[in-house]
């Protein structure tokens, strides 16, 4: 009897291997998707000059005490243009401040971009050397973060926002946090 | 002519796959990050060695040492600055994993989520070894226990079948 059970071992091993492969190769899993190391952690501290000097700089202290959206963008980034209208919609529909951080962009180019497209942002920080972006762990632009009232990072999207995601994922999260 | 067409198709295919990257923004930043190699060649060599172990978060299958991506250049400069500031390799790895997770290390660290990855080969080797030893032992004990020799009556019957009675035997002529 004991020996018989031993014959099942290869089948059990195959089953284990199949289970691991099933998880690893499932079509819904995107192996290039980067897990964010920041989820559940406090927003990194930073200090940036702002596009409008009158708004007096942008730092993590601006996010204190409210649910906020932080959006990295650049004038040279085409997908950013595509998501731009949705940032207006996001701010209006869910009544959250959206902060923009211009990533490795010339100030004049950022200014022109905002002049052309309008500003959905409460403030725009200028991250010209890209170091704040690295503190946020971004891999490109656009990227969007959602912070809760305590300044904890709750969500990160490493691609442009689209209407479906706004309605199905981002919107409900913002509502639940508020 | 056809060769040229084939080359053109290959080129277009290559461009299509290049454009099909996982992350959207691949345009060049208007502010490029320039590499700032360290003046001290030993420190620079130390930094370069570490760079080869750090994954480029944009191109993913390259290390930041090989990558042309702007963020990779930025990360290279960060590695250099921290080496120059006397930080240890472990401290620099911690700095990077705090921002990008374990993903940024090309060699996965040993922790709870990589337990299976690191231990499975040894576990499987142990199981294979165990199975091998068991099979060997079994075949050896089976060799010692040969089936009993034919008994007298069996031998007699066999002879009769083979020689005496061709009609009822194995179809001999």
Image (spheres, rainbow, N blue to C red):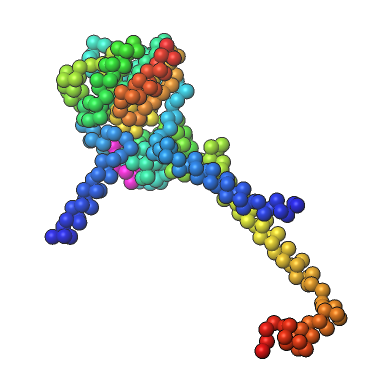
In-front residue for pair A151/A77 = A77
Q: Is residue A163 left or right of residue A45?
A: left
Q: Quadrant of the N terminus of chain B?
A: bottom left
State whether residue B92 appears in this view.
no
Q: Residue at x 28, y 16 (%)?
A: A89
Q: Residue at x 32, y 13 (%)?
A: A93
Q: Residue at x 23, y 33 (%)?
A: B29
**Quick one: which residue is furthest to the right in this view?**
B152
Query: Is residue B132 depicted above or below A163 in this figure?
Result: below
Q: How many labels were placed on the picture?
A: 0
In-front residue for pair A10/A158 = A10
- The image shows residue B101 at horizontal and vertical percentages of 45, 33
For residue A132, which quarter of the picture? top left
- The image shows residue A145 at horizontal and vertical percentages of 37, 23
In-front residue for pair A88/A21 = A21
- The image shows residue B113 at horizontal and vertical percentages of 53, 37
Decide whether residue B37 is among the magenta residues. no
- The image shows residue B76 at horizontal and vertical percentages of 34, 39
**Quick one: which residue is furthest to the front in this view?**
B167
Query: Is residue A14 depicted above or below A111 in this figure?
Result: below
Query: Is residue B135 depicted above or below A74 in this figure?
Result: below
**Quick one: which residue is furthest to the left in this view?**
B1
Magenta stretch in the rendered image: B64-71
Query: Is residue A25 depicted above or below A154 in this figure?
Result: below
């Amino acid at each position: 009897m004991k020996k018989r059970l031993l014959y099942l071992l290869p089948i059990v091993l195959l089953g284990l291997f199949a289970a691991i492969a099933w998880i690893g190769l499932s079509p819904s899993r995107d192996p290039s998707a980067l897990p964010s190391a920041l989820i559940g952690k406090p927003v990194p501290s930073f200090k940036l000059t702002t596009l409008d000097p009158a708004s007096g700089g942008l730092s993590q202290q601006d996010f204190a005490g409210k649910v906020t959206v932080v959006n990295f963008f650049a004038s040279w980034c085409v997908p950013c243009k595509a998501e731009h209208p949705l940032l207006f919609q996001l701010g209006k529909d869910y009544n959250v401040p959206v902060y923009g951080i211009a990533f490795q962009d010339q100030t004049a180019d950022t200014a022109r971009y905002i002049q052309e497209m309008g500003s959905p942002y409460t403030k725009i920080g200028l991250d010209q050397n890209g170091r704040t972006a690295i503190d946020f762990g971004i891999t490109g632009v656009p990227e969007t973060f959602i912070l809760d009232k305590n300044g904890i990072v709750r969500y990160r999207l490493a691609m442009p926002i689209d209407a479906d995601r706004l309605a199905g994922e981002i919107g409900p999260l913002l509502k639940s946090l508020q | 002519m056809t060769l040229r067409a084939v080359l053109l198709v290959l080129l277009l295919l290559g461009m299509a796959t290049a454009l099909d990257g996982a992350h959207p923004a691949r345009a060049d930043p208007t502010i490029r990050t320039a590499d700032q190699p360290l003046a001290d060649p030993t420190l620079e060599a130390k930094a370069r060695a570490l760079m080869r172990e750090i994954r480029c978060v944009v191109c993913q299958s390259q290390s930041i040492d090989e990558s042309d991506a702007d963020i990779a250049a930025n990360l290279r400069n960060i590695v250099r600055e921290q080496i120059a500031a006397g930080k240890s390799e472990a401290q620099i790895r911690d700095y990077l994993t705090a921002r990008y997770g374990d993903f940024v290390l090309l060699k996965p660290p040993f922790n709870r989520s990589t337990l299976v990855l690191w231990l499975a080969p040894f576990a499987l080797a142990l199981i294979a070894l165990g199975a091998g030893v068991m099979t060997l032992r079994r075949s050896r004990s089976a060799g010692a226990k040969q089936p009993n020799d034919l008994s007298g009556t069996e031998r007699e019957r066999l002879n009769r079948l083979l020689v005496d009675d061709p009609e009822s035997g194995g179809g001999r002529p």
